Image (cartoon, rainbow, N blue to C red):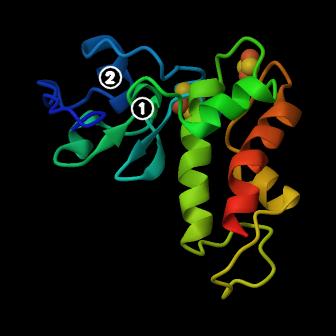
Amino acid sequence: MLNGVEAPVPADARVSLLDFVREHLGLYGSKKGCAQGACGACTMLVDGERILACLALAVQCEGREVTTIEGLANDGVPHPLQQAFIDDDGFQCGYCTPGQICSAVGMAAEVARGVPSHVTEDLAATDIELSHDELRERMSGNLCRCGAHNGIVDAIAEVYARRLR
Ligand code: FES
Ligand code: FES
């Protein structure tokens, strides 16, 4: 399933999830930055978990729910995080933005599940506060070449930091 709609499986098992979604299915929201797992521009959600789609094979997602930036809005109403990126100037050129937003949605779910990060002091904690350091560490896999990181962090904090406390 792709964004709630049945999607085909690629005939060629070597096709990456990113290329399949962009080049075969025509959804161009997810971006190809490095194609080697270094920038996060291609981030999608698979069964709610963030994944680097340039490093995943499309066939690995058979029977799973894939969500791209196109699938986050609800009946034309932007996802709260999409709106926050607009309100907080969380982008300049916008190339990294779909990946940033998908990654942040997955990141918030990780925090809610109590998944620790490199900077979490108590690894056994189940109620992790999404502090400034936690947020920056957890989003460190998503690069912004425009340097819009301050607005990006503000937007994510606005939507999730209070909600997760
Ligand atoms: S394009 Fe996938 S991490 Fe850069
Ligand atoms: S807004 Fe341009 S790369 Fe992030």
Ligand 1 located in image quadrant: top right
Q: Please state the horizontal and vertical placement of residue 120, each as a whole percent of the image.
A: 77, 73
Disc 2 on helix, strand or loop?
A: helix
- Disc 1 C-beta below 8 A from ligand 1: no
From the viewer's perspective, is 34 left or right of 13?
right
Dividing the picture into quadrants, the one containing residue 3 is: top left
Disc 1 on helix, strand or loop?
A: loop
Quadrant into which the C terminus falls: bottom right
- Compared to 146, does 154 lie above or below? below
For residue 36, say whether it is visible: no
Residue positioned 44% across, 37% down in the render: 55
Q: Please state the horizontal and vertical placement of residue 46, each as a whole percent of the image.
A: 37, 47
- Disc 2 C-beta below 8 A from ligand 1: no
From the viewer's perspective, is 60 left or right of 124?
left
Between 35 and 62, which is closer to the camera in this rendering? 62
Residue positioned 54% across, 35% down in the render: 79
Q: Please state the horizontal and vertical placement of residue 90, each as a whole percent of the image.
A: 77, 27
Measured Cα–Cα span from mark 2 to mark 1:
9 Å
Number of numbered discs visible in the structure rendering: 2
Q: Nearer the viewer, mark 2 or mark 1?
A: 1
Q: Which residue is mark 2?
A: 21
Q: Which residue is mark 1?
A: 68
Crowding at mark 1 (Cα within 10 Å: few <14, some 14-19, many 20+): many
Amino acid under label 2? Val
Residue positioned 59% across, 20% down in the render: 33
Dividing the picture into quadrants, the one containing residue 107 is: bottom right
Crowding at mark 2 (Cα within 10 Å: few <14, some 14-19, many 20+): many
